[in-house]
Image (cartoon, helix red, strand yellow):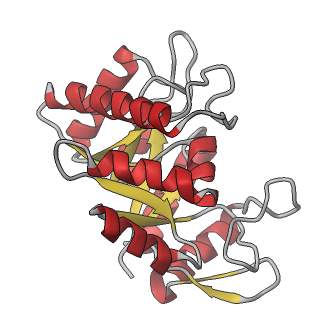
Amino acid sequence: MSLLLNCDLGESYGNWTMGMDTEVMPHIDQANIACGFHGGDPLTMQKTLALAKQHGVSVGAHPAYPDLVGFGRRSMKISGAELAALLSYQISAIEGMAACQGLSVDYVKPHGALYNDMMADADIRQTILQTIAAHHRPIKLMLQATPKVDEHRREAQTAGVQVLFEAFADRCYDDDGRLLARSKAGAVHKRDKMLAQVKQLASEGTVTSVSGHILKIAADTLCVHGDNAEGVAAIAAIREAIS
């Protein structure tokens, strides 16, 4: 099983620094770049795009609810029309800045609460699919690989959108194939467990759930996090493990 590595980047804002983008970029295949609504600002976006170009990394838009204070981790009750406009605005912003550097935006990965809401709410998912389908050129959507992967693929095909399914390197899976809630013990793997899960995904296309069940995970890309030096070292180890 061939897995790409994707990471959320470009999330610094003004004088506030988030992540270690320069150290992470050489190890990944896909950069999910914040578009200014949960993190990121024009200069940060510009610098992150330049880093992606330097290392030959694919660019993805990483749109969110308009929630800088909460880092996009709070759900918002907004209409479908407003959500569609928010998405189109953010995708267009990063796409325009990318074009100035001779880059294209290949996919969209919603951030934080919007990502979780997309996976849980069919109406929100449809709004996102229809917005991407209405974009002026083909662009992919990144979704979590869950037991509903076939259903989600059919939804995307009906909308005329190509999808990328992602798994998570450092998160424990519940028995239903979803991520174990962070409030529960063992929700985030330490280095040894994380690397074991990555190797299992790459070699067998499965993960072992919190209760020991073997779950099939049909993933195209693996989400990694590089918020600190330990995270960067872990990404380098993951790259080595799947190479």
Quarter that holds the C terminus: bottom left
Q: x%, y% of residue 50?
A: 25, 29
Residue 188 position (above or below residue 97): below
Looking at the image, which residue sits at the far left?
102
Quarter that holds the N terminus: bottom left
Left or right of residue 167, residue 193 in this image? right
| Residue shown at 68% from the left, 38% from the top | 75
Left or right of residue 208, residue 228 in this image? left
Residue 221 position (above or below residue 131): below
Res. 224 in view: no
- The quarter of the picture where residue 175 lies is bottom right
Left or right of residue 193, residue 25 in this image? left
| Residue shown at 42% from the left, 57% from the top | 142
Left or right of residue 162, residue 204 in this image? right
Q: x%, y% of residue 112?
A: 60, 42
Res. 62 in view: yes
